[in-house]
Amino acid sequence: MLSRTADHLFWMSRYMERAENTARMLDVNYQTSLLPQSLAVAEQGWRGLLSISELTGHYHKRFDKVEQRHVMQFMVRDETNPSSIVSCLRAARENARAVRGTLTTEVWETTNQTWLEFNRMLRDGAFERDPANLFEWVKFRSHLSRGVQVGTMLQDEALHFVRIGTFLERADNTARLLDVKFHAVESDFYGAADARDQEYDFYHWSAILRSVSGFEVYRKVYRNVIQPEKVAELLILRPDMPRSLARCTNDVVTNLALVANDQSSETLRRAGRLRADLEYGRIDEILSTGLHAYLTQFLDRVGDLGAGISRDFLVTAH
């Protein structure tokens, strides 16, 4: 396969996954903002969202204060923000258009229709009327896109690069979400909170689980009250949790092995090492050495993997 084609496929899937993850993070913040809380706590939540996406500096070039309405506009419809939902969907569509001959008709039409319909919804005021419904729509369209890819594309290198992009982006976003949200309630690991704090924490952890479609999964796996260390274990080490770091890394390695070439052995080795560390990791060891340090290192390793994949297979940097 031409490296330029692989590049477009890889980034098409990354941008679609990024749009979905941005919608998920906005949704959890929006739902949490509806709970009784102080202005300071609410602002901390929106600051955290900007921090997850490394957009704090970019945001402050546009707005003086961190406010819900400004952050929502910035992350949904601001075309100067490369990580806004509208920018990600446009980039996904442009990358898909560049390789229409490699994609099935269904994949192209799904990606193109998502872009066109999202813009129509923005013009019609759907975002202002019901933000939560718009976020659900974005998530659904991303699910539809992946389903059409797996259901209609030949199981060849093209699909493998699509899957590598999807799972690399998902691993990155899950780690960022975990890092910021756990840091916001770091005190949960130490001592007991009063009844009101515990009630708020339940909704906080429930919202985080729902943001990665993990609430029902958590109940099925652990069958008890929501505990921060169990949330961390589910989203880091459980290989059967679709959005966990372990699951995403495993899928990256599987697809990377299927497209391996003469110069990719080192990238594949590093990916396999990361998978092994997650496969044999224990949550008590991770928490005892510091969750923030662990996730920071994980993000560095994922970034290194992305750079290796670009160097070995692709042609351009994004």
Image: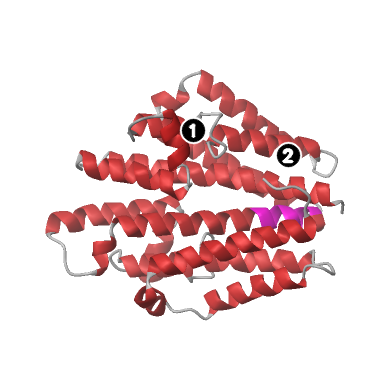
**Where in the figure is residue 279, as x and y percent of width and height?**
54, 77
Is 152 placed left or right of 127 in the picture?
A: right
| Magenta region | 158-165
**Where in the figure is residue 16, as x and y percent of width and height?**
62, 43
- Residue in view at x 78 percent, y 61 percent: 312
Q: Nearer the viewer, residue 300 or 104?
A: 300
Is residue 256 visible in this depiction of the protein? yes
Q: Quadrant of the N terminus?
A: bottom right
Amino acid of disc 1 = Val
- Which of the 4 image quadrants contains residue 256? bottom right
SS of the residue under disc 2: helix
> How many labels, in total?
2
**Where in the figure is residue 155, as x and y percent of width and height?**
79, 57
Relative height, residue 28 to residue 273 (above, below)? above
- Which of the 4 image quadrants contains residue 120? top right
Q: Nearer the viewer, residue 190 or 166?
A: 190
SS of the residue under disc 1: helix
* Residue 76 disc label: 1
Give the residue at mark 2: 95
Which residue occupies the extreme top position in the image? 124
Is 216 placed left or right of 163 in the picture?
A: left
Q: Is residue 41 magenta?
A: no
Relative height, residue 6 to residue 259 (above, below)? above
